[in-house]
DNA sequence: ATAATAAAAGATATTATTGTCTTTTATTAT
DNA sequence: ATAATAAAAGACAATAATATCTTTTATTAT
């Protein structure tokens, strides 16, 4: 479904959103531990997320990553589009170049429904929504 | 969604199913052209499909690949499970090891619905079903 | 029987993804 | 001002996915 990079990106943002004040920073090390992901790799991903303003970053002592309320209220779709592109939502499930309603691949119509429900679920759920589940201990970001 | 290998596998079987008599063989070259896929690569994939009895193969002159009625009536899910495994249907969307209803990742419940509709669509549609669309010229296996 | 055919099997090459390490730059506390 | 900190940037390494080529084996038409 998602690339590993995208999985880490989603989990990292949900983790960062645990600091609700929008000011307190979380370092890469802590994030990597909190989502059981390779530290250097999430560092790279966070660079990209920071460049594209999905998260904010602060250098130096007490630095790290944080998110404003506005950033937390973005749909998870934003992250997916940034990292994996729109392939999941717009590409043909069988890889045809110009698959469409009028010139479809055999799976096109069946797959349209699924695409739509994927888009819908990524659009309607924000990073904050998912973080709320974690804060309420109704969901986790890693396991042993 | 699917790996390239899996996309080719699905398209190749749908293409082979165009020979409805279950006897007439189609060669790799023709299949590769018919689905716009690299010849040697589909050859490899067809080897695996043949080994697992998704398709039948015949060596020598007039040889190639064909499918019996029983084979055509298998759900596309069989191919997906063989090539990509059950990750799409059983793995956690965020990559957690033991994600479940009682110990879920934040996206778990939302994703369950999608997984279910993917499984459903792969289970209820057979290779023959999709081939019917192609025969009826209501769908294509390649584009220019 | 023999030559031609086509898949099976095995080996190799290329590219993309994932993961790691080092150096540089900006910030902050002292 | 300076040293310590932590992200940014760039380079590199390992692995997996995709793609290609060669040799072997089985089959069939002659």
Image (cartoon, coloured by chain):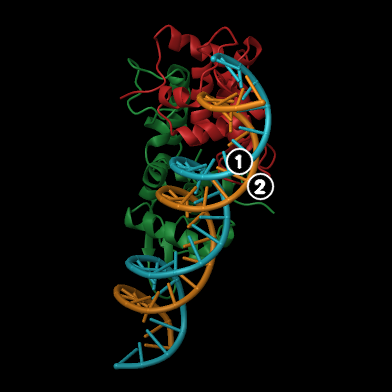
Chain colours: A green, B red, C orange, D cyan
The one nearer the camera, B114 or B88, is: B88
Label number found at residue B97: 2
Q: Do the residues bearing badges 2 and 1 touch, measured as CB atoms within 8 Å?
A: yes
Q: Which residue is mark 1?
A: B92
Q: Residue at x 41, y 25 (%)?
A: B33
Task: Please state the horizontal and vertical placement of residue A37, each as a whole percent of the image.
Answer: 56, 57
Quarter containing the C terminus of chain B: top left
- The residue marked by circle 2 belongs to what chain? B
Task: Please state the horizontal and vertical placement of residue A49, each as a whole percent of the image.
Answer: 38, 54
- Quick check: A45 left or right of C1? left
Q: Residues within 10 Å of mark 1 (few under 14, many from 20)?
A: many
Q: Is residue D2 above or below residue B72?
A: below
**Label 2, label 1: how far apart the Cα atoms are:** 7 Å
Q: Label 1's element?
A: loop
The one nearer the camera, D22 or C30, is: D22
Q: Residues within 10 Å of mark 2 (few under 14, many from 20)?
A: few
């Amino acid at each position: 479904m998602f690339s590993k990079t995208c999985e880490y990106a989603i989990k990292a943002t949900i983790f960062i959103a645990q600091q609700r004040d929008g000011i307190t920073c979380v370092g890469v090390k802590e994030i990597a531990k909190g989502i059981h992901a390779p530290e250097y790799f999430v560092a790279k991903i966070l660079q990209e997320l920071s460049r594209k303003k999905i998260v904010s970053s602060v250098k130096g002592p007490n630095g790290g990553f944080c998110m404003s309320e506005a950033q937390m209220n973005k749909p998870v779709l934003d992250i997916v589009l940034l990292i994996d592109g729109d392939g999941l939502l717009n590409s043909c499930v069988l890889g045809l170049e110009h698959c469409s309603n009028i010139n479809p691949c055999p799976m096109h119509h069946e797959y349209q429904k699924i695409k739509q429900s994927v888009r819908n679920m990524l659009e309607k759920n924000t990073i904050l929504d998912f973080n709320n589940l974690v804060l309420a201990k109704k969901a986790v970001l890693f396991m042993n």
